[in-house]
Structures are given as C-alpha cells and as structure tokens.
C-alpha cells in the first residue's frame, strides 16, 4: 500500500482539462517532485488531494482510506498539509500567533493554549524563525514569509506535505537554505510532494519526478531519467517559446 495514491484522476474547468486521467502515488518517506510548464495542472492536483476540488473522475486514497469525497478540513486533520503558491499569513498577527492557530486544528490539535504556544515555539525554532516570533507576520522578508508558510503547514502536523513553489523569488543562497530545510522536514518523518520551477532544487531533492503537460503525465522516473526524456525537453522548450511570443 502506498501512503498516498490517485487513480484515473480527471478535473476540467469549463472546456479545459486541468488534470487528465492521471495516476500517481507517494511512498512513505519519499520526496516526489512534480514539474511541468505553467498551466499544466500542478496546483489543481494539490487542490484535488487536499479536497479543495472534487475530481470529475478517479479516486484518491490516503493510508488506504478513500478520501476522494472528504472535505478539506477533514483531509487536513487526517494529515495532509499544504502550502499556497501565494503565501497567506495573517499579516497583523505575530509570527508565533500564525503558527499557534494551526495547532488548534489540523492533526492532533493542542489541548491547551499553553501547549499550543510551546508547540508553536518548537516549530519556529525548527524552521529558523525562533528569534522573529514576536514580529508581525506582515513585516517579514520574502524568505521569512516562505519559512512562515512552511511553519503554518507544519503546525497542522502533516504526514504528507504538498509544497507549491515555495522557492519562487528566492536567490541561490536562500534556495540552498530552503533545500536543507526540506531535507530536515523529510528526516522528521514527513513525506513531500514538491512543485518547483527551480529545476536545481526539485531535481536535487527528489527521488522520483512526475512531469505534467496539459494535465497529463508525460514522464515519470529518477531526475536523471526525466531530464533526458524528449517529450519533457519539448514541453519545456515549447513553454519557453510561448513566453517570448
Ligand atoms: P499549474 O499549477 O501547473 O500552473 P494549474 O493547476 O493552476 O496549473 O492550472 C491548470 C489549468 O486549469 C489552467 O489552464 C488553469 O487556467 C485552469 N484552472 C486552474 N484552477 C482553475 C479554477 N479554479 N477555475 C478555472 N480554471 C482553473
Ligand atoms: Mg501552480
């Protein structure tokens, strides 16, 4: 049994097939990379897994339980956490309050406010935001906002974490820091699906990579295998040409 598995998933918006007959799985302890040009369906797949959208067809299992029709709050409580492509802190709350909120819901919520506070501090130390815990979330730099987005996701105590382009806009040094942090998160026992345009990061982190194009899986394999795949190279070159026309 896989930790997470989807079979025959399809999701259309109007006439657009955002996800088209997709099969995927995630193993316990694995980092799975998910890449593909803009609009290829990566965020939609995360929304299907997290219960934000229901698939038109297909099923999703988490730890052997069919979660296809479950609501997003319940799926979060079962242990599937996610970050958002556009970070969403509560800007007028302190950093620690943002993380504390997540300890009130999610998996194994804290029983008292005091416990929530202690657990939030632990998470902030883990992601390197401990010294900034009393700052307003809205005053953080981009790198720290990304850290906080991770902290908020971790505060729901996920077993699986879906990461949507958390490295966008970071410089090479910051990307290295973020990669180290993701490895640390995996070592703590959390399995990851990583969506990233920064190829060096996604290929460097992942054991296995799935490539999407127009909602379909066009390649799957080790990072070395997929970057040599002709269809993959074409999809990316095609996307690059589009960007210049
Ligand atoms: P990616 O994350 O790979 O860039 P998305 O999953 O965001 O791709 O989008 C896949 C396709 O689905 C795109 O054509 C996009 O415009 C469309 N799409 C995604 N979400 C919605 C939505 N909520 N309503 C309508 N169309 C959507
Ligand atoms: Mg996206």
Image (cartoon, grey):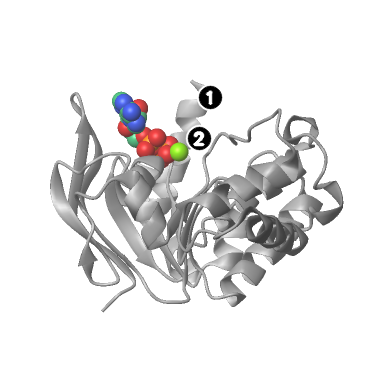
Residue 34: % across, % down: 43, 55
In the rendered structure, the answer to whether residue 219 lies left or right of residue 125 reads left
In the rendered structure, the answer to whether residue 134 lies left or right of residue 9 reads right
For the residue with label 2, is its CB less than 8 Å from the closest atom of ligand 1?
A: no
Residue 21: % across, % down: 17, 50
Q: Specify the farthest residue to the left.
A: 57
Q: Name the residue located 42 percent from the left edge and 62 percent from the top edge.
A: 79
Q: Nearer the viewer, residue 133 or 224?
A: 133
Q: Secondary structure at mark 2?
A: helix
Q: Nearer the viewer, residue 46 or 75?
A: 75
Q: Nearer the viewer, residue 205 or 30?
A: 30
- Read off the residue under disc 1: 244
Number of other residues with Cα within 10 Å of mark 1, as a class: few under 14, some 14 to 19, many 20 or more: few
Q: Which mark is residue 240?
A: 2
Residue 226: % across, % down: 43, 63
In the rendered structure, the answer to whether residue 153 lies left or right of residue 53 reads right
Quadrant housing residue 209? bottom left
Q: Name the residue located 45 percent from the left edge and 61 percent from the top edge.
A: 107
Q: Secondary structure at mark 1?
A: helix
The CA span between labels 2 and 1 is: 7 Å
> Is residue 183 depicted above or below 124 in this figure?
below
In contact (CB < 8 Å): disc 2 and disc 1? yes
Q: Name the residue located 75 percent from the left edge and 38 percent from the top edge.
A: 94
Residue 229: % across, % down: 39, 60
* Image quadrant, ligand 2: top left
């Amino acid at each position: 049994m896989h930790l997470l598995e989807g079979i025959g998933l399809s999701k259309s918006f109007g006439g657009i097939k955002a996800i088209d007959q997709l099969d995927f799985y995630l193993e316990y302890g694995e980092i799975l990379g998910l890449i593909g040009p803009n609009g290829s369906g990566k965020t939609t797949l995360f929304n299907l897994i997290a219960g934000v959208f229901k698939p038109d067809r297909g099923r999703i299992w988490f730890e052997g339980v069919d979660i296809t029709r479950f609501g997003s709050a319940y799926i979060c409580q079962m242990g599937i956490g996610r970050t958002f492509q556009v970070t969403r802190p509560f800007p007028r709350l302190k950093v620690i309050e943002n993380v504390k909120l997540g300890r009130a819901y999610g998996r194994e919520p804290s029983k008292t406010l005091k416990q929530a506070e202690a657990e939030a501090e632990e998470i902030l130390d883990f992601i390197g935001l401990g010294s900034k815990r009393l700052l307003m979330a809205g005053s953080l730099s981009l790198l720290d906002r990304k850290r906080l987005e991770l902290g908020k996701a971790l505060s729901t105590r996920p077993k699986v974490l879906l990461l949507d382009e958390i490295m966008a806009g970071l410089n090479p040094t910051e990307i290295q820091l973020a990669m180290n942090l993701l490895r640390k998160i995996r070592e703590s026992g959390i399995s990851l699906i990583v969506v990233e345009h920064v190829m060096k990061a996604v290929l460097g982190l992942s054991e296995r990579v799935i490539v999407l194009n127009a909602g379909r899986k066009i390649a799957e394999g080790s990072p070395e295998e997929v970057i040599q795949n002709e269809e993959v190279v074409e999809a990316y070159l095609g996307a690059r040409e589009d960007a210049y026309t």
